[in-house]
Image (cartoon, helix red, strand yellow):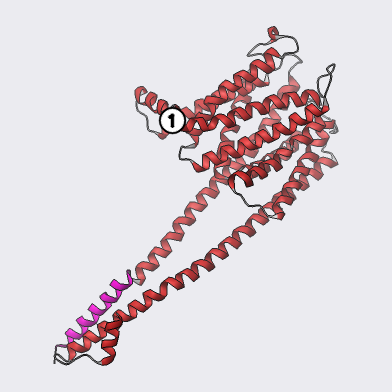
Amino acid sequence: MPHPTSAHHASERAHHAAVAVSGASPTDDKAVMAKAPRSLDVAGRWRMSLSTVSLVTLVVQNAMLVLMTRHARATTPPGQGFHTSVVVLLQEVLKTAVCLAVLAWERRVRSAAEYAAVVQSVVCQPECVKLALPAGLFTLQNFLIFVSLSNLDVMTFQILSQTKLLSAAIFSVWLLGKSLSGVQWGALLLLTAGVVLAQLETAMGGLTRRGPGAPSNQGPPGGAEQLVWVGATSCIVSGLSSSFAGVYFEKVVKTTPPSLAVRNIHLGLFGIPFAVVSMLVLDVLLAPKGPASFAFFRGFGPFTWALVAVHALGGLLVAAVVKYADNILKGFATAVAIIVSGVFASLLWGYVPSGAFVAGCALVIVAILGYQYAEDAKARAAKAGGAGSGGAAGAGQGSPSNQQQAAAVGGAAATADALKAPGSPPPKHARTASTAA
């Protein structure tokens, strides 16, 4: 009779044989399955954190921009204010300069020659051409806004310009394959109505002015013949070009490897020349008092330079929002910024919010809650569906493995029986299990 430990060794060999057939130990499987969800969860939380931070910062930036622009226009004598096209050009230059500095930090550049080589590689790559389209469309948007304001009253302009909220959603479905439920489309309609109401009284001059420093409502320039259909068409096409450019840029930054800094540099390479052309056309060639009245730094001071910096920050934040969130959420952030700026205008300048403004704020809040509720419902449904399909797949994959492991254990048991009785043939059930293995 063999030594007792021989049977023990045989059972150990049988266990190792079963593990070899199954491919991994149960402990290893549990460790892998426990580790993967944690890593995915951390990545998801990190992206959610970046999305939330960028959206909240964009709300603050937009509100600051509105308040600063109103203050600058209200405190500057007529004919001495800055040119909007110059501010747009300078913010584009500043934004590109910031991204060039970020690029040097990303690539860990240590010398001027190395930095020049890095910039050349970024500028000369074929990926750069992809940003020519959105840069041109943004410039077209600025020109069409000028045309629409010249042919429409401010109230009609404010109403028609909000069509970009819906067109951004349509382009997101078309270009990005985004799926929106009926509740979310309804929330977008509510959002559009809320923004229109919130800005309606401002456009009509319906807010009661109490304190000094608040801007007065200015309509379109008088004395010139206005073509309403030209203004309405220009306003709608402006919204379409803006939303299409935004969704196109979102697709580029989400589906191609270059970083946000590189993409903003590419956008600036085309945006700066287009901004120069826009400035020459709008404020030089089409100036009411002729080209000689144009002065590049007219109305500039510390406050105007701060306005340029806030504008540039907005460009960087929009790029971050479309990468880590999307254009639809950017529209919601812009709507919230309108509410925030209205509240601060009331606190700073003594405005009394009208009933329309309050109703618009309520609609915006309902729209946000409805859209987020529908988004959460879709996420829960997708998670439940993924868990169900994953469990079924795991069960289907586990069956052959379990059969093989049982067969291996059965074969090992036959080997142990043979060791216990050397020279005797294995039992019939052992031969059957060994054959199955």
Q: Does 242 sit left or right of 103 as displayed?
A: right
Amino acid on which disc 1 is placed: Gln
- The number of numbered discs placed on residues in the rendered structure image is 1
Magenta residues, dominant SS class? helix
129 vs 35, nearest the viewer:
129
In the displayed orientation, state which residue is furthest to the top. Answer: 292
Quadrant where the N terminus lies?
bottom left
Question: Would residue 82 be seen by someone viewing this image from the given angle?
Answer: no
In the displayed orientation, state which residue is furthest to the front. Answer: 435
Q: In which quarter of the image is residue 4?
A: bottom left
Residue in the picture at 18% in, 90% down: 420
Q: Does 144 sit left or right of 418 as displayed?
A: right
- What span is colored magenta in the figure? 2-23
Residue tagged by mark 1? Answer: 125
Query: x, y percentage for residue 13?
Result: 23, 78
Residue in the picture at 73% in, 24% down: 146
Question: Would residue 385 be seen by someone viewing this image from the given angle?
Answer: yes
Query: x, y percentage for residue 203?
Result: 81, 31
Query: x, y percentage for residue 95?
Result: 54, 27
135 vs 88, nearest the viewer:
135
224 vs 202, nearest the viewer:
224
How many residues crowd around disc 1 within 10 Å: few (fewer than 14), some, or many (20 or more)? few
Image position of 58 with respect to 383: above or below: above
Give yes or no for residue 202 being in the magenta stretch.
Answer: no
Q: Circle 1 — which element?
A: loop
Residue in the picture at 32% in, 69% down: 23
Image position of 348 with respect to 166: above or below: above
Q: Does 200 sit left or right of 56 as displayed?
A: right
Quadrant where the C terminus lies?
bottom left
32 vs 133, nearest the viewer:
133
Image position of 434 with respect to 153: above or below: below
Residue in the picture at 75% in, 33% down: 345
